[in-house]
Image (cartoon, grey):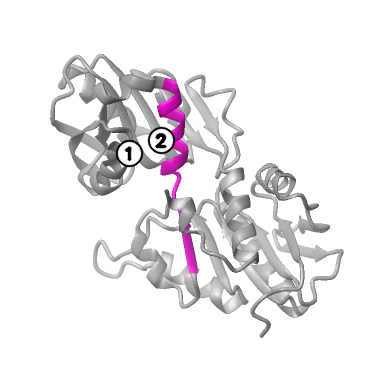
Amino acid sequence: MISHGKDIKIFTGSSNPALAAEICKIIGTKLGEAEVKTFADGEVSVSLYETVRGSDVFLINPTCNPVNNSLMELLIMIDACKRASAGRITAVIPYFGYARQDRKAKSRDPISAKLVANMLTAAGADRVLTMDLHADQIQGFFDIPVDNLRGNPIFVDYYAKKFGERCEEMVVVSPDVGSVARARIFAQKLHMSLAIVDKRRQKANQCEVMNVIGDVAGKECIIFDDMVDTAGSLCNAAKAIVEVGGAKAVYACASHGILSGPAIERLNSSVISELALLNTIPTKFGAECTKARYLSVGPMFAEAIERIYQEISIAKLFN
């Protein structure tokens, strides 16, 4: 196995070609020539139209909706590169699907995140580059190197420029107890205080907000989370912050804007003033969701890819 490819090649599936094109533009290389198509019966087919023999190959494809198609595209692209004698294959997965199925919540539950990790390794991936895994422990599901980038620095830079000195008077709110560690780091970087929304989840994708821990009365708040799916938790948390906590204004940010089901309608009618999202998932709902503002992860992924290719540390990107 060649540990370092002779040159760099970047390919993409159909999940987020705009992000892949942006990354290539920043790096200064062209996107690899490939075709990903689906047959009439639903089978995915991948064709590479340029040599990858001995190359350092990066395959960019977030496993977002349609999740299973996106995952199969990535697996088949990995297999195609492996059989074409690529020097090293890095699966670049800005959004890692199935990450929420990372443990057994009840008897006979699968651990699907581990299964996906096994599939990527078995297909031939040599390393994985992703962002804001739902649970950091998922890195341990892999027997290959995993670089889990943080969207935190992008949001810190955005809000520091947006609010300036007002930041020190604002409050970062964790939408649940499980996100406290993530929210605390974010709050420390912006010199903000921290509050927590205590909620009780009744069933999947539904929750009941119970209380607000911390002082948010009369203050501007930023809810910080890793993803927004149906937006039920986020909108309920924002409502509680205003009605129970007495907050003056609520902003929100999350790395992954899945925005499924009634998410758009809920966000548009919520008390949230603005929702900042990263473009790890395509921004196809940008026009419909009037409160959404997308920030690009292209520069961060481009630098990470260059550093991996050059065999130098990416620790700088976490700061």
Is residue 158 covered in magenta? yes
Marks 2/1 in contact by CB < 8 Å: the verdict is yes
Badge 2 crowding class, 10 Å Cα cut-off, few under 14, some 14 to 19, many 20 or more, is some
Task: Say whether residue 64 is visible.
Answer: yes
Q: Position of residue 132 (x, y in %)?
A: 43, 51
Give the amino acid at mark 1.
Lys
Identify the residue shown where x is 62% and y is 67%. 90
Is residue 170 covered in magenta? no
Task: Say whether residue 71 is visible.
Answer: no
**Mark 2 sits on what residue?**
156
In the foreground, 121 or 264 = 121
**Mark 1 sits on what residue?**
189
Disc 2, SS: helix
Identify the residue shown where x is 59% and y is 59%. 92
Magenta stretch: helix, strand or loop mostly: helix
Q: Quadrant of residue 101?
A: bottom left
Question: On the rendered image, what quadrant is the N terminus found in?
Answer: bottom right
Identify the residue shown where x is 42% and y is 57%. 99
State left or right for residue 99 relative to residue 213: right
Q: Position of residue 153 (x, y in %)?
A: 44, 42
Range covered by the magenta-colored residues: 146-162
State left or right for residue 189 relative to residue 76: left
Identify the residue shown where x is 86% and y is 64%. 49
Badge 1 crowding class, 10 Å Cα cut-off, few under 14, some 14 to 19, many 20 or more, is some
Give the number of marks: 2
Q: Position of residue 316 (x, y in %)?
A: 47, 54
In the foreground, 230 or 311 = 311
